[in-house]
Amino acid sequence: MHAIVLDKFGDLEIAQGQTLVIRGAMSSFGQAAVKLAVNVDARVIATTRNPARFAMLEDLGAARVELEGHDLSRRLAEVKQIDAVLDLVGNSTMLDSLAMLRRRGRACLAGWLGGLVPIAGSNPLLQMASGVYLTFFGSFVFGTPGFPLSDVPLQKMAEDVAAGRLNAKRSRVFSFDEIHEAHRVMEANEAGGKMVVVH
């Protein structure tokens, strides 16, 4: 997943020492992205809507955690110096994500945790920052001719987990008989990571 999230995935091309903002970092995908970015020695600024989750993101390796909001670009001291943004919140924050990037910085829209509300403004393209790149990634492309499963570095991921370079702990395991409780935990946003149901 290292190559998907930080290189091929959204063409973020994150390199050692660069600064990456991950919006929606408490999602399971966001947590994986934090771990992968830290694994390549990128500096991660993670966001969450819940201040109680700051410590968990710092434990994953985020250099700093910020409260998610539509005005994040106005609150970051590094505005116009950010190398890349992985935006998992979606349409409601996309323009703000672009506003924080340095010239030739890259943003990847890869989730809609904030819903699919229309992008604000009568002509969103005129609101986009000049000189930055916007890409999109949807998991539904896996297995298509343009994105074959062979492009996913599963072996490298497994080796990184086995060597301790990548922490891939699950948050909770449920038996199949506990499926209703698993759904309740997921819908109440209590999971704190990837849940597994075993049969």
Image: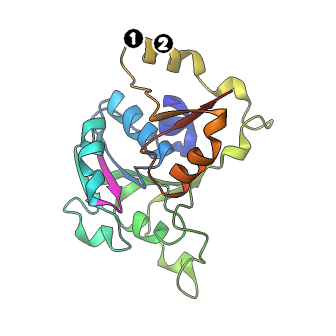
In the figure, residue 145 lies in which quadrant?
top right
User: What's the residue at 48%, 78% (across, down)?
Assistant: 127
Q: Position of residue 147 (x, y in %)?
A: 72, 36
Count of all numbered marks drawn on residues in the image? 2
Q: Is residue 45 magenta?
A: yes
Specify the amino acid type for callout 2: Glu
Which range of residues does the magenta coloring cover? 44-50
Q: Which disc number belongs to residue 121?
A: none
**Viewer-closest of 31 and 174:** 174
Tell me, yes or no, whether the two marked residues, 1 and 2, touch with CB atoms within 8 Å. yes
Q: For mark 1, does the 10 Å Cα neighbourhood hold few (<14), some (14 to 19), or many (20 or more) residues?
A: few
- Could you say whether the residue bearing mark 1 is in a helix, strand or loop? loop
Q: Position of residue 43 (x, y in %)?
A: 27, 41
- Marks 1 and 2 sit apart, C-alpha to C-alpha, by 6 Å
**Viewer-closest of 108 and 183:** 183
User: What's the residue at 33%, 74% (across, down)?
Assistant: 71
Residue 78: in sight, yes or no? yes
For this orientation, the residue located farthest to the bottom is 122
Per the image, the residue denoted by label 1 is 163
Q: For mark 2, does the 10 Å Cα neighbourhood hold few (<14), some (14 to 19), or many (20 or more) residues?
A: few
In the figure, residue 118 lies in which quadrant?
bottom right
User: What's the residue at 50%, 72% (across, down)?
Assistant: 92
Residue 81: in sight, yes or no? no
Specify the amino acid type for callout 1: Ala
Per the image, the residue denoted by label 2 is 159
Position of 16 relative to 88 (above/below)? above
